[in-house]
Structures are given as structure tokens and as C-alpha cells.
Image (tube, grey):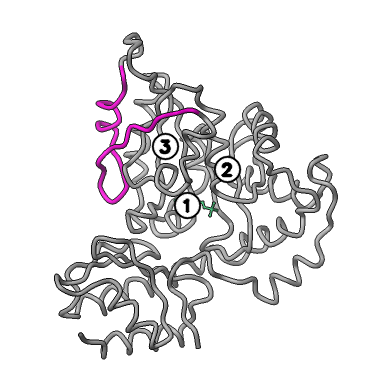
Amino acid sequence: MEINLVSDTVTKPTPEMMQFMFKAQVGDDVYKQDPTVNELEARVAKMFGVEAALFFPSGTMANQTAIKLLTNPGDELIADKYAHIYNFEAGGVAFNSGVTCNLLDGDRGMITASQVLSAINPPDFYHSPLTTLVCVENTTNKGGGACYDLEELKKIRMVCDKYNLKFHLDGARLFNAMVAKHQRPDQFGELFHTISICLSKGLGAPIGSILLSDHATIKRALRIRKIFGGGMRQSGFLAAAGIFALENNIGRLTEDHRRARELGRALTAKSWVKTVEPIETNIVIFSVRDGLTERQVIDKLNERSIAISALGKGKLRLVTHLDYREVMHSYVLETLSKLDF
Ligand SMILES: *Cc1c(COP(=O)(O)O)cnc(C)c1O
């Protein structure tokens, strides 16, 4: 039994999902003639109460497309220092859009309206880059799965409106946030100019992300996706996996969250663990006591068939997901309770 807690992207399609994919009606999506892709896009747009949606091969491409659409070269965007768009998209913000990042020192990857307000460059001062976009992440990845209160997001939107800024949500794990905080998709749909969501994380699809916005913006997004090489042909097979994931795998995210909390408690009890960060969703980040290395912890867990990841600076991460089942969970809890250095 190999137990992979490295990421929630490691899930494989279940036989039921595969069956559903096999049966999909497909066409050429570059001509917008794939009925299953069209159905997925229409469904997700409706779910979020927005006009339109576009299917992407990856969350990175969906985010990069949004940033390209909402900025001009030379502009600056505002985001948290942990932001995926800055740390884990290979410098795409600079490469694709010619934009710089003004990174804020937020709380577990989350920023506030007042922080945003004080980071906006005066538009008439032509020596500094023009601030045109604010990006937030929900849940935060590097911030340990933390999720926003809607009130703070509304306040950020008010600042954006006042200073003529666009507002993008990197919602790779938005469904985890909504389940944890009892929020609805339409509450996010009305707050942002663009939203990206991933179907290939907690929801368990093999591939796929969605960009949401208004008709005019999605029409422009189609061109940018083509430029980025993201036009796909019979992608209905993949979209079908997304439809299956939305129909079957949202509610069960609470199980991932419970298991993450239980892992956190087991770690808190260990003398070799220095701190466990607050756990709101499916990500557990902890640090080890001085003198103990991440490598030592990883090696010892590997010997017991458990894989987790190192984040550097003495921090480690576990992520629970669809393929991490109860039997595995019991085994991991028991293993942790016996593990000492
Ligand atoms: C995973 C992730 C993405 C997109 O990742 P892809 O691997 O390109 O699909 C974007 N933002 C966050 C916060 C993520 O965790």
C-alpha cells in the first residue's frame, strides 16, 4: 500500500469516472463543436451565476490567460507573497504579460483590503508601474489551505472599483473553501472579474480547469488560449470527467478536511513537531524541531510507504484527497503515533 500525501493532484480517475468519460459525445472543440465541453462550460457558468466559461488544460494556463486579459505590459498586479501566480507559474506573469508583482505580506496567503489600498501606485505618478489588477487565492496553497471570509473579499472589491482595478480569483481549490465555509459559487461569481477553478485537484478529474467571466472577456480569452497553445480538439472526454467530478465529488471534500484535522492533531502530539499551522481545509503544514531535518522525516515516512513533501526552511506538507481512503488514514495515524526520532 503506497500512500501519497504529496498533493491532491495525484488522484486517478475511478472506474465510474472512466465509464462516464468513455460515453462522452465529442466534437472538435477548437471549432466550439464539442457538445460535452460546451455542456461543462455552460454548467459551471450557471453554477457561478456568470455569463460564460472556458475549459483549459491547466490552472496555470487559466490564471495566465486571466492576467493577460486584465493587464497591459508594464502594469503591476497586487498579490500575496505566497501567490501561486508568482511562485509556481514559472515567471509567466513577466513572460506572458510583461507585468510586475507587488507582493504583500499577508496572513497565510490571504491579504486584506487595507493592505491592497496602501499598495496601489498613484496613477498619475508615471514613474511607477500602473496598478491594474488584484489577484487573490482561495484556498491558499502555500498558505496551508486557508480560506477567506466573504466580507474581506467584498471590501477588496470595493477598493478595486474605487481605484479602477480588476479583481481575479485563483480558485484552484475554491470548492474546498466553499465546503469549509458554507459558501455558494454565485457569491464568488458576483465578486470577481475572472475566476479560475481546477477540476484536477480535490475534485479528482485527471485534467482540466475553467475560467469564468462575462461573454466579452471569455471571447477574448478564447484567442489568448489559442496563442498559449491551449486549443484542444476532442476534449469532451476530459470535460466529461469534469462533469462527473462536479456531480459526485464536491460534498465528500468534508472527509478530506476531517482527515486533515486528524492528521494535524496526531502531529501536534509529537515532541519532534515544532508547530502545526491552523487547518481549515485539506492541507496540513508543519515544522520540525531544530536539529531535525525535513529529509529525516521524509525518509522515515518513505520507509513506511508514506510520501509527503518538503517545503524548505524546516516545513513539511501533507495534502488529503479522494484517493486517500479511511484504511490508509488509520494506518497513517497509527504510524505517526509510533514515529519518533
Ligand atoms: C494547482 C494550482 C494552480 C494551477 O495548477 P495547474 O497544475 O497548472 O493546474 C493554480 N493555483 C493554485 C493556488 C494551485 O494550487
In the picture, the quarter occupied by the C terminus is bottom left
Q: Where is residue 237 in the image (x, y as percent from the top left)?
A: 76, 59
Q: Is the CB of the residue bearing disc 2 within 8 angstroms of ligand 1?
A: yes
Q: Where is residue 263 in the image (x, y as percent from the top left)?
A: 32, 76
Report the Cα–Cα distance between label 2 and label 3: 13 Å
Q: Where is residue 265 in the image (x, y as percent from the top left)?
A: 25, 76
Instruction: Give the residue type at disc 1.
Output: Leu
Residue at image coords 40%, 30%: 100
Tell whether 19 sits left or right of 256. right
How would you rate the neighbour count of disc 2 (Cα within 10 Å): few for under 14, some for 14-19, many for 20 or more? many
Report the Cα–Cα distance between label 1 and label 2: 14 Å
Instruction: Give the residue type at disc 2.
Output: Ala
Rendered image quadrant of residue 113: top left
Instruction: Give the residue type at disc 3.
Output: Cys
Residue 51 vs 183, above or below: the answer is above
Residue at image coords 42%, 47%: 84
Tell whether 268 sits left or right of 157. left
Residue 62 — which label? 2
Q: What element carries label 2?
A: helix
Residue 135 — which label? 3
Q: What element carries label 3?
A: strand
How would you rate the neighbour count of disc 1 (Cα within 10 Å): few for under 14, some for 14-19, many for 20 or more? many
Tell me the residue that label 1 is attached to.
174
Mark 3 and mark 1 residues within 8 Å of each other at the beta carbon: no
